Image (tube, helix red, strand yellow):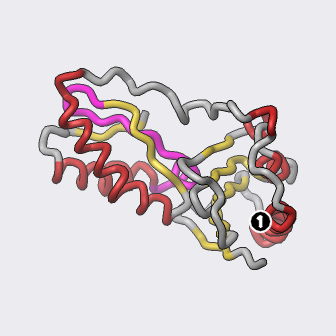
Amino acid sequence: MFIETETTPNPASLKFLPGQQVMPAGSREFTNDEEAAASPLAEALFSLGDVTNVFFGRDFIAVTAGEGVDWSALKPQVVAILLDHFISGAPLFAAASADFKVPGEDDEDLGDAPEDADIIDQIKDLLETRIRPAVANDGGDVLYRGYREGVVFLKMQGACSGCPSSSATLKNGIESLIKYYVPEVTEVRAA
């Protein structure tokens, strides 16, 4: 088995591609040891001590290292853990945590008004077809959190959540695209 590694716009994060499906649907983010306990793989990565975020995408794992960590020393350790996991066929999540909920992942929307249903459908369609695939290429994800009075609320995850350029991505890229296709949108904010 060979695991490819890609850089991300976030210098603290690397994207690891095992050449197979990681998540059958959706994504999962782990931001601390407590959350990581739900996944043997995330737990093993956090046990390295230098890992501050683990993100599972459809076909990749994004790992974020703490400030000042040297990736040349950490990368081989991460690859070894990933190889052990995928070669052994171990489950991604612990059996006891089948219903585990990552904080923020499945939160309710922030109170969308029923009269905005058409606008919200357009926004969600853009997220699924254009924005989320592009953000996944950079080792992250973006989740819809709500729409109120022209403002779309989104949550950045994975390599994108701590990226120095994430606010620019959110404002310049995502906001411009959504405003172009959905003129009712006046602003995009991080939730």
Identified at 27% across, 43% down, the residue is 123
Tell me which segment is drawn in magenta. Answer: 147-165
Can you give x and y, in whole percent of width and height, for residue 181 in the image? Answer: 17, 52
User: What number of labels is visible?
Assistant: 1
The residue positioned 40% from the left and 33% from the top of the image is: 145
For label 1, count other residues whose C-alpha is less than 10 Å away and answer few (under 14), some (14-19) or many (20+).
Answer: few
For this orientation, the residue located farthest to the left is 183
Q: Quadrant of the C terminus?
A: top left
Q: In the picture, which quadrant includes the N terminus?
A: bottom right
Q: Is residue 112 left or right of residue 75?
A: left
Query: Is 4 on the left or on the right of 158, as rendered?
Result: right
Residue pictured at 86% horizontal, 53% vertical: 48
Q: Position of residue 189 (x, y in %)?
A: 35, 37
In the image, residue 153 lies in the stretch drawn in magenta: yes
Vertical placement of residue 93 versus 169, above or below = above
Residue type highlighted by circle 1:
Asp
Provide residue 127's location: percent of width, then percent of height.
Answer: 35, 50
* Residue lying farthest to the bottom in this orientation: 2
Q: Is residue 82 magenta?
A: no
In the drawing, does residue 165 fall left or right of residue 6? left
What residue is at 30 percent from the left and 36 percent from the top? 152
In the rendered view, tell whether residue 61 sits above or below residue 31.
Answer: below
- Which image quadrant for residue 98? top right
Whole-percent x, y for residue 146 in the image? 34, 30
Q: Quadrant of residue 183?
A: top left
SS label for mark 1: loop
Instruction: Read off the residue under disc 1.
Output: 70
